[in-house]
Amino acid sequence: MKRIQNHNLRKDSSIVMVGCFDTKAEDFEYLYSCLSKKGFKVITINTGVYGTTKLFPVDFEAKDVAQNTGASILSLQKNKERGKAIAVMGAGAAQIVTNLYSENKIGGIIGMGGGGGTFIALQVMRVLPFGFPKLCISTLATKDLTAQIGSKDITLVPSIVDIAGLNSISKHVMQQAAAALCGMMDAIELVEERDVKSIAISVFGNTTVCVDVCSELLKSEDFEVLAFHSVGIGGQTMEELTLEGCFDAILDITTTELADELCGGICSAGPDRLTAASNMGIPQIVVPGCLDMVNFGPLDSVPVKYKKRQLFSWAPNVTLMRTNKDENRILGRIIAESLNTSKGPVTVLLPLGGLSKIGATGEVFHNPEIDKELFNSLKSTLNNNIKVVEVDANINTSHFATYAVNELLKFIKK
């Protein structure tokens, strides 16, 4: 398994500095000097459409950035479509950084900007893997940038003042940001690598007991266990890190995000959920955990078309909707079609005693007939070479957890 890499970091590794040098040259000159004083070479990428600077060396000019997408900087200047220009420059700079990373030339990246500059910087940083130092000084650092950051480990530093010329506050922020990035680069050299296998596991409030027992059992076997909260970004992160080779196996107890993707809930992880392990060919145990529910916000936020469905208030800001037979048939096919493409071993476990804590006997979402639709859809669509096991227990029990871990260990110990 590929561990968190040091990215071939050496003292002669370079730092990428990306930003709009046409409008913020003075600010970037100061940041450049802060980085250079730390002993690192700085590779500069200008994403400013309307000009450049001579205050410091520019390695990749805006025309070079645009050309990486097949666009012309002159056409971007002429059209004056700010949104399109930001998208093009972000994509072009991302391609340049991808190339630099693949050539082992860089060990960190820093960007700085307002709205447009932040969008570009974050777009560029997202092409770099987990563990690679990434820092962005932004006027938007205290806003919700979930859509722009996604699952990446990007450090945001509030600019405090606008990035519009140097002053005592902006200099202080840039000095500390430069020191922080360089500190992150130094810290990578100190990461101790252990020869242990890593298991990713998905969890939700309604599967916590199960996942806690699974984690303890796996840790007792000297595995590293990394839990991901199935609230959308958790599933996305698990999928992306799987593609980066961070795990040896997946114990996917809680696939509830698929129900939110189907029904428009607030915890969707997107259409690629449950694809990474199959593509990577690593062992996976898959459970339809919490597919008996779709997550919405407060009761008044539930879409009108679902108002007459069975709803349950999990918390003041979380309303759960019980999935129906039609939705479960569809979900069964979605899971099966994803797993049928797997390049590695797969076992599907079906908890006959309910898909969640509140799906157990006597609980509000207990409905074996609906669960049966999901199970039948899965079994009828899965390839014959994929093992399916019906477990006579509720998912959120130590009994089910023990069974799931034993099935996973069969794969790993081979």
Image (cartoon, helix red, strand yellow):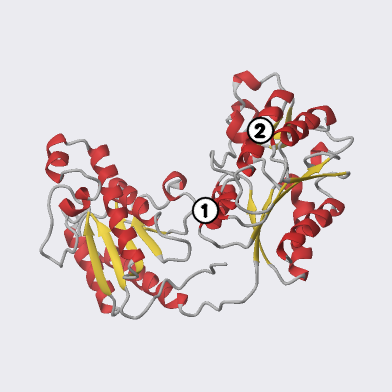
Please, what is the three-letter code of the amino acid marked with disc 2?
Arg
Residue 337 vs residue 172: left or right? Answer: right
Residue 277 at x, y = what percent? 60, 52
- Decide: is 388 above or below 121: above
| Residue 317 seen in the figure | no
Q: Residue at x 87, y 45 (%)?
A: 393
Residue 332 at x, y = what percent? 69, 34
Please, what is the three-letter code of the amino acid marked with disc 1?
Glu
Q: Residue at x 66, y 38 (%)?
A: 336
Disc on res. 124: none
Specify the quadrant of the image occupied by residue 320. top right
Residue identifier under label 2: 333
Residue identifier under label 1: 240
| Residue 276 seen in the figure | yes
SS at badge 2: helix
Viewer-proximal residue, 211 or 163?
A: 211
Using a 10 Å C-alpha cutoff, classify the residue at mark 2 as few (fewer than 14 neighbours), some (14 to 19) or many (20 or more). many
